[in-house]
Amino acid sequence: MTTDRLGLHHKDLLSPLLRAITVSLSEYCFANLYLFRDSHRYEVLSNGELFIKGLTYDGFTYLMPTVPPAALDLVRLKERLRAVDFLFPVPEEWLGAFSPAEFEVSFHEGDADYLYTVEKMSTLAGRKLHKKRNLLKQFVDAYRHEALPLTDEHMGDARSILDAWQKDTGLGAGQTDYGPCREALDRYEELQLCGGIYYAEDEPAGFVLGEEVNDETFVLHFAKGRTKFKGVYQFMFNNFAKILPPKYKYLNLEQDLEKENLRIFKSSYVPDVMVKKARVRVKQ
């Protein structure tokens, strides 16, 4: 088996495989894997079948398949899984490939992706989202604002937003996703990302960026805003949902990693679907 640290040179190999899988999980995007390659210690393993080896945020080793498990040799898979803690992330629709007599399936709450309908995010309709509508209105009423595509001519402003956001956190760069986000901006076109940048009172106020994960789901990998502009996040999400092509049904805001601030923030938008990710172990 050959082992290689995941790098940009794997893009042409992995992107078509991941795109062909068509699940809505945020991990099945090359840019996501590449940008967080250091955090998860990603390696590409090849020996006839191709896997990605990684480390979960809570410290477990895993293999990630690059094809649905039904297409794998399960005998060889069982042998490979004995060298790691589990197979991950496995969408629920794949679990039929695993015999309960041979495999153990578990779910971790912090793994699940938060999915929202694009319609909900573009309207913020309903009683449960009235606070979001109020914050959106406050932003629109309080500031002269502009929403633009995130293109090369605005990358300098996006970097300044990211730097200011990092300073506002009061944390070190290694304690946030500053590094992956900065690289996403630096390699924006190379990684085929897409996003929007937002201005308030002619100042750079925030940006979002992500990519298509399947034909009906767009995943936002990063959303960074200047909190001095009250309501900027509500404005960004609402505006970006409005301009997404109509084929997209869902907006994926990824998992919360069991971080309380992320859980509260993402739950406050009342997700329409929590997409679980199974951890599949070989029974001893």
Image: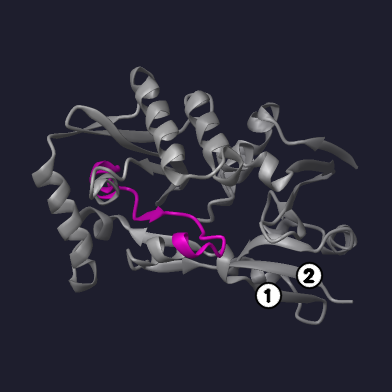
Q: How is the image coloured?
A: one colour
Looking at the rendering, in which quadrant would you find the C terminus? bottom right
Q: Amino acid at mark 1?
A: Ser
Compare residues 67 and 223 and report the one nearer the observer. 223
The residue to which callout 1 is attached is 106
The residue to which callout 2 is attached is 281
**Element on which disc 1 rests:** strand
Q: Amino acid at mark 2?
A: Arg
Q: Position of residue 214 (x, y in %)?
A: 47, 48
* Residue stretch rendered in magenta on the structure: 237-262
Q: Confirm or deny contact between disc 1 and disc 2 (CB under 8 A).
A: yes
Residue 43's place in the image compared with 128, above or below, is: above
What residue appears at the point 91 percent right and 42 percent down from the top-left corner?
1
Q: Residues within 10 Å of mark 1 (few under 14, many from 20)?
A: few
Would you say residue 249 sits in the magenta stretch? yes
Horizontally, residue 28 falls left or right of residue 82, namely left
What residue appears at the point 56 percent right and 60 percent down from the top-left corner?
257
Q: Position of residue 161 (x, y in %)?
A: 37, 32
Q: Position of residue 208 (x, y in %)?
A: 37, 40
Horizontally, residue 216 falls left or right of residue 67, namely left
